[in-house]
């Protein structure tokens, strides 16, 4: 195939999908930092050097607050002493309360910050509502985002083929000229920016399509030799908070600087560090007396669990902490600028052509 074919393919896909791709990239840039900043303003507490209350006291206080209108199904504690505990509830989906671990006071409902809620709606469903909100526009928005994402992959591949220098002179091909006018500058930026950001964008595309299409997700896992990972469902109401307290104390003593998620009969301990950010080992405990009965290291969990964790970690760029997050941020911002520069170059060419006719 000639470069002319790829030029046409690049243009035909970029013009209709360009603005949607700007939206996907900008919303993705915001969502990169939800786990770092999403709780600010609603889950901050002051320790004043005090120790947290016993876990059973915190859960009893929360249960009294609920007055029988809901059930506790889990609690997450954090290594940051000034991050409130998150108590998960049975209903509705994703419901939780922030609780001050030093006083037992309920600070308020867990609520996704508005900026992240809007960004997620744009990024995943083109502002369509989620199933929990009534599903209006969820399927069509999700489909458009998925098709746009596939188009972006083809745009990147065709753009790379168009850009590749005939004699392999990469040094000159990666230069941005600043002294030959706006058109030349934005042309060079479009080419070089596309190449520089392509690695991150392709990683985000390959992982992100798992949320768009079931057929893709099934195939993705199959290629990696696994069935699709099942989502964990922790909906069993908590019983015997004293047993939870005993189990938690032992787990906390073994993992003093880890995020711990307690559920009825088991607890997940996030391993943290570099690599898979959803890696966790699971402790099982007797719900009657809190005695630890078994430990399942993350390395021994099913392959599908590892794949699922890496899909998320690679998609949000958290695998090497802030280093990769900043690199991802710069790449997706460039990704958002590229369609705009592409429109500029396309319109400029159309104007020049008309002048010559």
Image (spheres, grey):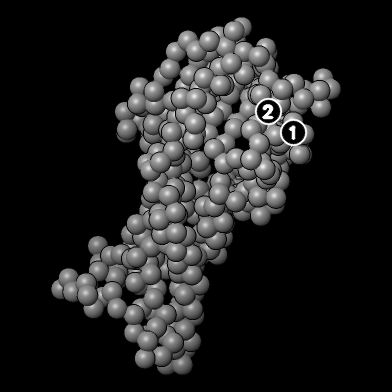
* For residue 189, above or below residue 101: below
**Residue at horizontal 60%, vertical 51%?**
37
Locate residue 213, reporting x and y percent. Answer: 49, 40
Task: Identify the mark nearer the N-term, 2 or 1.
Answer: 2
Residue 326: percent from the left, percent from the top? 44, 59
**Separation of marks 2 and 1 at Cα, in angstroms:** 7 Å
Depth check: give the residue in front, 30 or 121. Answer: 30
Q: Residue at x 40, y 54 (%)?
A: 324
x and y percent of residue 146 in the render?
50, 48
Assign a secondary structure to mark 2.
Answer: loop
- Tag 1, which secondary structure? loop
Residue 263, picture quadrant:
top right
Q: Is residue 19 above or below residue 78?
A: below
Q: Tell me if 177 is positioned left or right of 144 in this view.
A: left
Q: Nearer the viewer, residue 292 or 297?
A: 292
Side of 15 relative to 130 (left or right): left
Identified at 65% across, 24% down, the residue is 55
Residue sticking out furthest to the right? 67
Inspect this view and state whether residue 24 appears.
no
Disc 2 + disc 1, Cβ < 8 Å: yes
Q: Nearer the viewer, residue 321 or 45?
A: 45
Residue depicted at x 40% and y 46%: 319
Name the image quarter holding the C terminus: bottom left
Direction from residue 341 to residue 23 in the image, left or right: right
Quadrant in which the N terminus is drawn: bottom left
Q: Which residue is disc 1 drawn over?
A: 103
Q: Residues within 10 Å of mark 1 (few under 14, many from 20)?
A: some
Nearer the observer, 309 or 243 = 243
One can see residue 330 in this view: yes
Residue that mark 2 sits on: 53
């Amino acid at each position: 195939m000639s470069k002319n074919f790829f030029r046409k393919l690049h243009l035909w896909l970029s013009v209709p999908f360009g603005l949607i791709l700007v939206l996907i990239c900008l919303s993705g840039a915001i969502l990169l930092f939800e786990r770092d900043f999403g709780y600010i303003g609603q889950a901050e507490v002051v320790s004043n050097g005090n120790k947290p209350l016993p876990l059973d006291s915190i859960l009893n206080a929360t249960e009294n607050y609920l007055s029988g209108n809901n059930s506790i199904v889990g609690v997450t504690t954090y290594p940051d002493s000034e991050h409130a505990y998150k108590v998960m509830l049975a209903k509705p989906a994703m419901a939780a309360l922030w609780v001050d671990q030093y006083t037992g006071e309920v600070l308020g409902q867990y609520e996704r910050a508005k900026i992240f809620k809007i960004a997620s709606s744009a990024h995943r469903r083109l502002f369509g509502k989620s199933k929990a909100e009534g599903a209006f526009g969820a399927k069509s928005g999700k489909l458009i985002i998925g098709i746009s994402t596939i188009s972006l992959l083809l745009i990147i591949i065709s753009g790379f083929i168009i850009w590749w220098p005939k004699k392999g002179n990469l040094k000159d091909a990666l230069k941005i000229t600043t002294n030959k006018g706006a058109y030349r500058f934005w042309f060079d930026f479009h080419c070089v920016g596309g190449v520089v950001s392509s690695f991150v964008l392709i990683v985000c595309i390959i992982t992100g399509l798992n949320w768009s299409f079931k057929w893709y997700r099934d195939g993705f896992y199959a290629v990696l030799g696994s069935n699709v990972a099942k989502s964990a469902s922790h909906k069993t109401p908590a019983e015997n908070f004293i047993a939870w307290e005993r189990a938690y104390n032992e787990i906390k003593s073994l993992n003093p600087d880890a995020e711990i998620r307690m559920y009825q009969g088991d607890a997940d301990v996030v391993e943290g560090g570099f690599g898979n950010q959803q890696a966790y080992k699971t402790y099982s405990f007797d719900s009657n007396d809190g005695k630890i009965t078994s430990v399942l290291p993350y390395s021994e969990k099913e392959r599908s669990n590892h794949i699922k964790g890496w899909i998320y970690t690679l998609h949000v760029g958290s695998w090497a902490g802030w280093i990769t997050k900043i690199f991802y941020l710069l790449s997706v911002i460039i990704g958002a600028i590229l369609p705009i520069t592409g429109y500029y170059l396309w319109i400029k060419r159309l104007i020049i052509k008309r002048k010559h006719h």
